[in-house]
Amino acid sequence: MDFFLSELVGTAVLTLFGCGVVANVLLAKSKGFNGGWIVIAFGWGLAVTFGVYVAGKYSGAHLNPALTIAFAMTGQLPWADVPVYIAGQMLGGILGGILTYLMYLPHWAETEDADLKLAVFCTQPAIKNTPANFLSEFLGTAVLMFGLSCIGANTFADGLNPLIVGFFILAIGLSLGGPTGYAINPARDLGPRIAHALMPIRGKRDSDWGYAWLPVIAPICGAIAGAYLYAALVTPVAG
């Protein structure tokens, strides 16, 4: 697989499993209905784990435009590769959202709350406060980028790295996910949000485009900050 296809398939797997666990918990008459936040956090951790297993060998498994841009900003990825990575990630996010819709096809009509249907696909803040929501996504993604850099500096048994990354995502979800639902990934949020807008979901609301910019811009800013913080701490100061 080239890195475009790798990022597309890996992000689709991540999004299908991630949005899928939210659907399982939120949609009426699902077997996992009312499973709660811990189930969702574990599901997203495993979603990232297996997305990384799918894509890691071929593209490094960014699966996240914020990480891709941060890698380019710090010289770890050629800028010429960035549009191809992001195109794959965004298409993968849309595809994962569409597959989630198809997987839970009978349950949309059984679920009355349009906000819950939207929440399957994308994040919504627990309390709408733009500066606080931006800060939450910024800090969450800065922690993500910094932590992934720290994980990458360690040596694990062959094949174990994606599992460690998944546990790290679980930690972020359990500890930092409450304010905004921890998008920390523009493709994970915007891709399925587009799928929500496109799919003929009975009783759906608008896709909350007024908020949609925040889980795109804040994670990008946060990832860049996390990457530069790591570089500042591990790179000796000249002179």
Image (tube, rainbow, N blue to C red):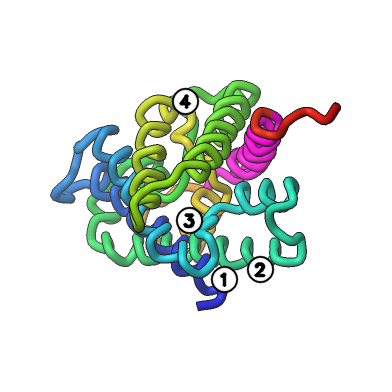
User: Mark 2 and 4 residues: CB-CB less than 8 Å, in contact?
Assistant: no
Badge 1 element: helix
Spatial separation of the CA atoms under disc 2 and disc 3? 19 Å
Name the residue tied to disc 2.
84
Question: Between marks 4 and 3, how big is the CA–CA gap?
Answer: 20 Å
Residue 196 screen position, x and y as percent: 46, 56
- Which one is closest to the eye, mark 3 or mark 1? 1
Q: Residue at x 35, y 57 (%)?
A: 158
Mark toward the viewer: 2 or 3: 2
Cα distance, mark 2 to mark 4? 32 Å
Q: What crowding class fits label 2: few (fewer than 14 Cα within 10 Å), some (14-19), or many (20 or more)?
A: some
Mark 4, other Cα within 10 Å: few <14 / some 14–19 / many ≥20: some
107 or 141: which is nearer to us? 141
The image quarter containing residue 229 is top right
Asked if disc 3 and disc 1 are in contact, CB closer than 8 Å, the reply is no
Q: Which residue is mark 3?
A: 192
Q: As rendered, which of 103 and 152 lies closer to the eye? A: 152
Lower position in the chain sequence, tag 4 or tag 1: 1
